[in-house]
Image (spheres, rainbow, N blue to C red):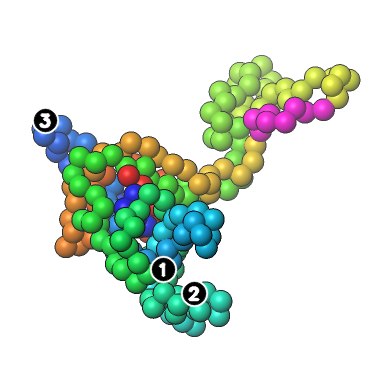
Amino acid sequence: MPGLIGKKIGMTSMYDAAGKNVPCTILEAGPCVVTQVKTLEKDGYEAIQLGWGEKTEKRTSKPMKGHFDKAGVKPQKRLAEFIGFNEALKAGDQIGVNDVFNEGDFVFVIGKSKGKGFQGVVKRHGFGGVGQATHGQHNRLRAPGSIGAASYPARVFKGMRMAGQTGNKRVTTENLEVMKVMPEEGLLVVKGAVPGHKGSTVLIRK
């Protein structure tokens, strides 16, 4: 399997083999259930669909309930597709963290970053601010400065770094080392930070 769906638990620290204290993130990885196996003949491509986190039938739409009933599994909170899977897997099979990851592996973690709301250019893009605080300066310290030319081109170019919605975007953090695998608890400890708040859903890919 190339990966699993999981949840961010929080951060801690561990000592590596050299005795250095490194920051780590604890992830709940799986167990995931196979909800569909897509084939080249039927779907046009080969992939496996995994589900994670059971939810009640009351909160499941009728089309999705039929999808889960066809696979013979309970309704799942989150679905994701993976390619490059074990062809022996079939709908209804369960995959745990120890079936996919080993200590020393490197993984990509995909999640949604923390939303910061509407922010100015200093917080959003790291601008240094304009001008100085003295000599009659009023409220221009954190202003963006000039955003375009005058009569030509008489518009603001696309991609101009300005104030706006910050965070709450899909982010991929690459090459995080797996420090520890705890199959009994279904936990994975990776080196470094991953996007999202505590309790947020993440995709963990090898």
Residue 25 or 95: which is nearer the viewer?
95
Q: Taking the image as drawn, is residue 195 in sight?
A: yes
Residue 131 image offset from top left, x and y in percent: 63, 18
The earlier-in-sequence mark between 1 and 2 is 1
**Lateral position of residue 166 relative to residue 4, left or right:** right
Label 3 with label 1: CB-CB less than 8 Å? no
Which residue range is magenta in the image?
155-162
**Lateral position of residue 150 relative to residue 6, left or right:** right
Q: Is residue 32 above or below residue 134?
A: below
Residue 67 - label: 2
Picture residue at 77% right of the left edge, 28% below the top: 156
The earlier-in-sequence mark between 3 and 1 is 3
To which residue does mark 3 refer?
A: 18
User: Extreme front residue here?
Assistant: 41
State which quadrant residue 177 falls in: top left
**Lateral position of residue 116 relative to residue 27, left or right:** right
Q: CA distance from mark 1 to mark 2?
A: 8 Å
Picture residue at 44% right of the left edge, 79% below the top: 69
